[in-house]
Image (tube, rainbow, N blue to C red):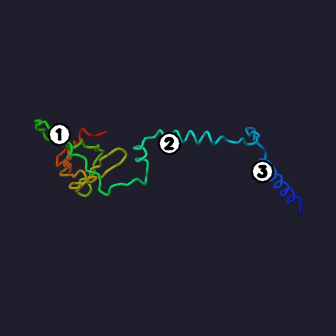
Amino acid sequence: MDKASKKRWAIWLLLLSVTVAAIFAPGPEEEQVSAAKPRDTAQKKTEAMQVASAASADDYDEADPFAPRGWEPPPPPPPPAPKQIAVQRQEPVAPVVVSAPPLPFNYMGQLNDGGEQVVYLGRGEQLILVRAEDTVEGVYKVLKMSANEIEFLHLPTGEKQILNMNTARP
C-alpha cells in the first residue's frame, strides 16, 4: 500500500471510531435507572371496580358492540316545515348597453402602394399594416379608408368607430 492509501484508511477508521463512540456514549439528559418497585395492583383493581359500578345500565348498552339491534332502518326525519315566502315585486332592469371600447390604435402614417392605400397603425410597441377590408387582430374590421379617416367595425358589438388621421398623429 502506498502512503496516500494508508492515510485514507486511517481517516476512515478514525471516522468509524468517532461514530461508534457517539452512538454508545451516554447523553447529558440520561438518568441512571434504579431498581423497579413493585406496583400496588390491588388498589388499581378497586378503582376500576368503582368506576365500572358507577356507570349506568343505559350507558353500558350504548357502549356494548354486541348488544342486540333491530334490522329495520331508523325512521326518516320529519319533513321540514314549509317556509313562508314573501312575494316581492322586482323593478324591471334596464338592459345593459354594451359599447365598443375606444380604438387602441394610433395613426402612424400611410403609403400609396401601386394605387392601394396602406396605413401604418401603432398599438403600444407593435406596428400594424392595414388595408381596406382587412380584419385587425380578429376584433376590428376596416370598412373604408379615406384621406382623413379610417372607419372600423368592432366585430363583437357591431359598432362602427372612426379614427381621424389628421388629429391622431403621435
Report the residue at 76% width, 40% height from top.
34
Kindly report the distance in space between the C-alpha atoms of the residues bearing marks 1 and 2. 49 Å
Give the residue displayed 86% in from the left and 58% down from the top. Answer: 4
| SS at badge 2 | helix
Local crowd size for mark 1, using a 10 Å CA cut-off: few (<14), some (14–19), many (≥20): few
Q: Nearer the viewer, mark 2 or mark 3?
A: 2
Q: Which residue is mark 2?
A: 52
Question: If you read the primary sequence from the N terminus, does the residue marked by circle 2 or circle 3 appear first?
Answer: 3
Residue topped by disc 3 = 19
The amino acid type of the residue labelled 1 equals Lys
Neighbor class of circle 2 (other Cα within 10 Å; few <14, some 14-19, many 20+) is few
Q: Amino acid at mark 3?
A: Thr
How many residues crowd mark 3 within 10 Å: few (<14), some (14–19), many (20+)?
few
Q: Which mark is residue 74?
A: none
Residue 117 at least partly seen: yes
For mark 1, what is the residue?
83
Identify which residue, 30 or 102, lies in the foreground. Answer: 30
Q: Residue at x 24, y 55 (%)?
A: 135
Pinpoint residue 118: horizontal percent, then vertical percent: 26, 53
Quadrant where the image shows the C terminus: top left
Image location (x, y in percent) of residue 162: 19, 44
Asked whether the residues under the numbered discs 3 and 1 touch, taking CB atoms below 8 Å apart as contact, a structural biologist would say no
Q: CA distance from mark 2 to mark 3?
A: 53 Å
Which secondary structure, mark 1?
loop
Q: Is residue 115 above or below residue 96?
A: below
Vertical order, 90 against 127 (above or below): above
Q: Amino acid at mark 2?
A: Ala
Q: Quadrant of residue 9?
A: bottom right
Decide which of tag 1 and tag 2 comes sooner along the chain. Answer: 2
Front disc: 3 or 1: 1
Judge left or right: residue 66 versus residue 34: left
